[in-house]
Structures are given as C-alpha cells and as structure tokens.
Amino acid sequence: MDGFFSHSKTEWRTAATRFIHAWLGLVGLTADIHAAEMTARFDRNTTYLNESVTLSVEFENVRPTSSPIISWPSGLRVANAGNSQQFRSVNGRTTHTFIYKYLVTPLKEGEFTIRSIRAKSGNRSLSAGSLKLKVLPANRRPKDDPMSNYAFLKLVLKKKQVYVGEVFPLEVRLYHATDVDDIQYPKLDGEGFTMGSFIKPEKHLTQIGNTRYGVYTFKRAATAIKAGKLALGPATTDLMLLQQIPGDFFRRNRRIPVSLKSDITNLEVLPLPSAGRPADFSGAVGQFAMVASAAPLEVKAGDPITVKLTLSGSGPIESLGFPKLNWPGFKSYDPSAETRTTGPLGLSGSKVFEQVVIPEDNSITELPELRFSFFDPQRRQYRTLTKTALPLKVTPAEKSDASPATLSGVEPDENEPQDRVDIVNIKVRLGSISHLAPPLFLRPWFWGLQAVPFALWAAAVVIRKRRDALANNPRIARRRRVDREVRDGLEHLKTLTESGQTEPFFAGVSRLLQEQIGERLDQPAGGITAGSLEDLARLGTADETLEQLRELFAACDQARYALQQSPGQLTAIVIQLEETLATLRQMEVPH
Amino acid sequence: MRSVSDWTGRFLACSAALFLCLGTAAAKDLEKAFEEGNRLYEQGRYEEAVMAYRALSTNGISAPLLFNLGNAHFRAGQLGLSIYSYHRALQLRPRDPDTKANLRFARKQVGEESAAGFWDRWIRGLSLNEWTALASAGLTAWLLLLTVRQLRPAPKNTPGWTTRLAGIATIGLSFLALAAWVNSSSQTAVIIVPEAVVRNGPLEESPELIDFKALDGTELSLLDQKDGWVQVTDRQARRGWTQKNNTILLP
C-alpha cells in the first residue's frame, strides 16, 4: 500500500539527515546574512626570546573549507594548538566562530612580521591583515616582572667565620612555585675562595607564607685562601618556568626562560695564627687523628720497610700529604696513597699512606718518630700528632747482595731488589754529546784500517817467499853474494890505492876476478886461473873482455915480482877491473 | 821581520785556541740546558722537562740525556716514549744498570716482563760497535802474529797461539755478524698512544682484531710497512696492522 508509512527505515533516515542539513543551512544562511569576518591576533605583541605566544585565527560567521595558509617568517617555531568552535547568541543575534590556534616560540630576537594569512570558504577567499611580533632578549625581563615571583635563588652559609685553608660547605637553594625545566647548575664565584664542584641537588617542598615552593638544594665545598672580609656570590642560574596555557584543551605549558640571581653574602676569613705554629706544619686545617705502623722491624741493611700511616677526620682529606721524613741513614721513595671520603662533599674520611724506607747500614737502631701537625679551627689552635720511635733491628747485608756489573753476561737484574717501587732518579751529568753515526762496520775508514794488518801480513808472505826462493837456488844466492863481495871489494881496493899497498891490492884484484869468473862459470873460485878464460870464451864472452881479463891476470902475476906501483897506476887498474867485472855480470850464463 | 812560517804558526795557534774556547763555551751551554731540564723535572714539570731534553737532543745525544728523557716521559705518563728512550740509551751504554732497571720497571707498568731471550740479552750486553771493535782486535792480533811468524820463523813451533787467536777472531766475527743480524732484522715498534687499534689489514675498513690489544708501552716486532701502516706481531705470535703514528720505531 503506498503512502506516508510505506517508506523503509533507510528512506526515513536519509530524509531526516537531509532535513537537519537544510535546517543548519538555514541557520548558517541566516548567520551569513550578518557580517562574515576573518581575524588573526597574538595573545601579546611583545615577548622574550624562547618565550611562547599564541596566535589565534578566527572565522566569524563563516566556515572555512581549508585550514588557514600562513606565511611564517623564519626564526619562529610553530606548533598547531588545536581548533575549536564557539556559538554565541545575543539579543537574537547568533554568532558562530571557528578558531584555529598556533603556539609560536621565537628562536631569535627582533621583530617578526606575518604578512599573509589566507583561507578559503567555498569559492570565497578570505584574508586577515599582517601581524607583528616583537621579541626582546631574555635578560631584559624587568625585575618586577611577575614571572620572578614564581622562582628565586638563595645562597646559604652555615658559618659566618672560617680560617684560611679551612674547607666549609655552602648551599645554593632554588625555590620555585611552578614547575620548572632545564635547570642549570648555579654559577658561583668569590674572590679569595677555591670551589669544589656542585654535587647532585636534593629536592624537597617547603611553604613560605601562603605559597608552596619546591626547593632544589645545590651543595659544594669551598676553601678560603686569603684572610679578610670576603664577599661570596651572587649565585646565578638559568631555567625554564612552565606555565599552563589558559584554555588549552591538551593542558600544554608555555615555557618561559628565566635568569635568577641570589644576594651576595659576606664571610669573615681569619688568618692562621703565627704563634705556636709547629715547624712541620704544612697547611692542613681540620680535625684529624693518626694511626701509624711499620713492618718488618727486623731487616738487613738495604731491605725495605713499609711505613703505613692513616690520617682520618674532617677537613681536606684529599689534599693531605705524607709528613716529610728527615731520617738520616734511610733511603725513601715517594709514598703511595689511597683516599676514602665520607659525606656528600667528601669533607671527612681517611687517607692511607704507604711509604717504603730502606735503612742503609746496620748502625740504625730505631725508626724515628713520625709527626703530623695541623690547625684545629674548632679549638682554634695547632695540634701535633706523634707516633713515637719504633725499635728497629738492622743486620749487615750479605756480600753477595752487591755484585758489580760484568761483561761476562751476568745480568745485574738478578741483584736488583725485586720490590723496586720507583724508577731510578735522573742523572746529573750530561756526558759527551755525539751525533748519531752509522755503525763502525759501515764506515769506510774502518775497513781501510782493517786492511793495514792484512797488507802487512801479505807483505811478510812475499818477503818469506823470496827468502825461500833464494834458499832453494844456490846459484842465485852465490850471485848475490859475489855481487856484494865485488861491491865491497872494489871499495876496499880504492882505499888501498890511496895508501899504495901493492901486495894486498893485487891480492884483492885476483880474489875478485876469481869470485866473479867462478860465479859466471859456476866453478869454485879457488880453481879459477887465467886458463879459465877459455871456458869464458866458450860461453861467448867478447874478445875485448877476455883481453881485459888477461891483462888483469898478468898484472897480478907481475905484481909479485914488479916494483911498487904508483897510486895512479893502481887506480887505473881498479877502473879497468870495475868495468870488466860489470861486463861479466851482464853476461848471459846458463842456470 | 817575521817569516811566513812564523806567521802561519801563530795563526794556527790562535785558531786552535779560539776553537778550544768556542768548544768549551758551547759545552758549557749544553750543560746549562741539561741542568735546566733537570730543574724542571725536579719541580714536577715533567712535560716541560721533556721539551727541554728534546730541544737539547737536537745538538746531539748522550746516554744520560736519553735516560733523563725517559724518566721525564715516564713521569708524564708516556710509557711508550719512556721505554723508547731507555732503549736508545742502552744502545749507547748497553750495561748501564740504572737504565736497565728503569726499562724493566717501565715494562712492569705495561705488564710485560723482559721481552728478550737469554742469547738476545747476552748479545745486547755489548753494543754493535763494541762487538765490531772486539772482532777487529782479535783479527788484527792474529794477522800481526802471522806477520811476525812469516818474518821470523820461531825455532820452537807454537801453533797453539796462532790457532787460539784464530779461534778468538772467528768467534768475534761470528758474534759480530749475529749482533748485526739481531740489530737489523728485528726492528721494534713501541706503542705510544693509550690504546692502539690493531686491524686485519692496512685499511680503516679492515676488521679490528678484538683480542689484540696494544696499550701504551707495548713492544712489538715490526714485520712490514705500507702507506702509513705498520704490520706488527707480539710474543703470542698474533699479527696485525696499526697506524704508523701509533708507534715509534727503535732505530
């Protein structure tokens, strides 16, 4: 059956939707009859570096069909802060507003201009005017800026009077009434003080008046290094205060950078008194106790003894030093130390030293007393802790303990004390400086020098061989002997000519003739006569030479019977003899 | 009037005197510079002492200078450079007990016992030049004895002395050869950085050898060099490559 009630559920649903859209359109159309606007504004036109502002873009009585298009200048960080709608009806006039929000954080100082904010609504183009935002430096926030009431800094000293060298604790407290972030460790300086590092801060809550504050407490140790009324601080720090953005659906926070500064605090630093200062005082200020021991107490000379010293108490434990030892007869090395501190600032604890000392001879009978002096700021006086002398038994060292370095290859290492605790100290003399040179065997002059004994030996071998050659050839030896005798004989004859001694002269001439001719003929000299000249002729001797020889032999024969000859005559004979013998020597003879 | 030879003699004498004075003055300057380095050392200014000793070494080196440089490096926490300096000092004075003690102490800090075997230590008991001189002396004595016997053959034949000297000369020559081989064949590289990375190959991309740690002061044997890298091996026969500027090579 057709009719109103014959439609299906789907058809009814479709019709209802169309009716609602038509009604809304009518309302919208009605609203459109009134003025349609697009506006944009910052919640404030001036801000500080890194401090966020909110940009709202509102569409009144117009529905944008796309998100606004905004020409953001560089230097701004932008985040979408959400969309919302508002309906308002006043005196029958209805206003429908669409709101787009942006969280804008400036990253640099200066003036920013957003030149263009546009949107579309259907076929219509909408735009808002340009916007300016001024960004000031963060430190130009005025003192009475209400933001500083949310946080402040305080410098706290528990003591108003300290001594030079005394370590004392101080605190910098950060009070904040809102949430904070990016807290920096405080900066705190003071002329005349040395500062330790801040330790990790403690957190707690406190109430001041009607306001609850969170408190960060930063602690550090400080030491006064000069006397007088000294100023400490101010302490400064930077952080971000977090402020919830009003009306933000996601309850996000606005980040506000803040710099805080504390007041300056004065401290009276007293000088250490000169009266009563012990001679061994080395600057320690605090309250300390000392325990000392040594082992072994029976040693040989040259063996080590370990002295253990524990200093404990409150004060600059780390910087405590082992008391200077002035122990004659002992050799000592640098001590080792181990420090254990207690408390968050390390202002108390203990330091354990181990010092090796070596008695150098067996005349030593005790380990001298140990003294440690310090200034007690609580008692306001110097104190000296003493460990009395300990009896020591030192026996002589064994001889084998000291053996010199040798070239035999025995390492001095074997005699080194096995528990050497440090390196041998530096040498005091430079020695002779030389430049790096190649090894000896790479230098030419070295090989030149090595050649000398070799050359000498080679020469000696040659000489020896010549000698052996002579020894094995009698003819050569005879020749050399005869040459020597002829040379010497002729000299002798010349002297005889001066003295005019005829008989020995001719005897000498005869002997020389016999020797030379005998050597030439390889016949005994005693058997040579004038008749041997025939043998010489057979050897090819020149007739002239033979004739000379006959004359000489005849002269010798005649001399037995002749009268004394004059020196001139004798000289002529010597000359003739010399020439003839020289000719004979040059003659080739069979070997 | 003085002769030319007279003037020449005077000139030479003056030159010799001037040279002597200058030489003496220069030696005094070096001693002063050395004392300054020592003063810095005693004051605990070890790095400045290192620089002072190094500046002085540009004029030449001596065993005490290298020893003190080693000490300064040691105090400054530069174990590798201290070991290197002690080695160089031992090359000049192989038997100095102080240098040996400090080298051993430095090696202990690295965790290394003596790196050399008995024979190697025995060879290094004399320097290369000392072995050379010893061998040369033996050979010279032998040759001179032979020369004398050539010229004056002894009526009693004493071949024993000749043979003994020949033996000494031969032994000396053999040890010289061995010392030269030891010196030249096994060059040592000392690590001078806190921890040197050792890789499989001479490239940054080569995988790192995890179990081959080369700490400051470690002495390694040099096998090869290439492009700013050196190949080294340790006493456990592990091999690897590390950058040359992580090491310093013993001459």
Image (cartoon, coloured by chain):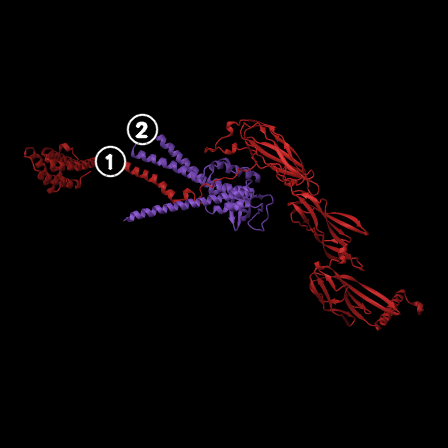
View extreme (bottom): residue: A33
User: In front: A237, or B232?
Assistant: A237
Tag 1 residue:
A470
Chain A colour in the picture: red
Chain that bears disc 1: A
Three-letter code, disc 2? Lys
Three-letter code, disc 1? Leu
Tag 2 residue:
B156
User: In front: A7, or A42?
Assistant: A42
What is the secondary structure assignment of the residue under circle 1? helix
Q: Are marks 2 and 1 in contact (CB under 8 Å)?
A: no
Position in image of residue A332 (x %, y %): 56, 34
Q: Which chain is drawn using purple? A: B
Residue ID at (81%, 71%): A36
Left or right of residue B121: residue A73: right
Q: Tell me if residue A535 comes above or below residue A107 in the rendering.
A: above
**Mark 2 surroundings within 10 Å by alpha-carbon count, few (fewer than 14), some (14 through 19), many (20 or more):** few
Q: Is residue A284 visible?
A: yes
User: In front: A379, or B184?
Assistant: A379
Q: Tell me if residue A296 comes above or below residue A247 in the rendering.
A: above
Q: Tell me if residue A182 comes above or below residue A577 in the rendering.
A: below
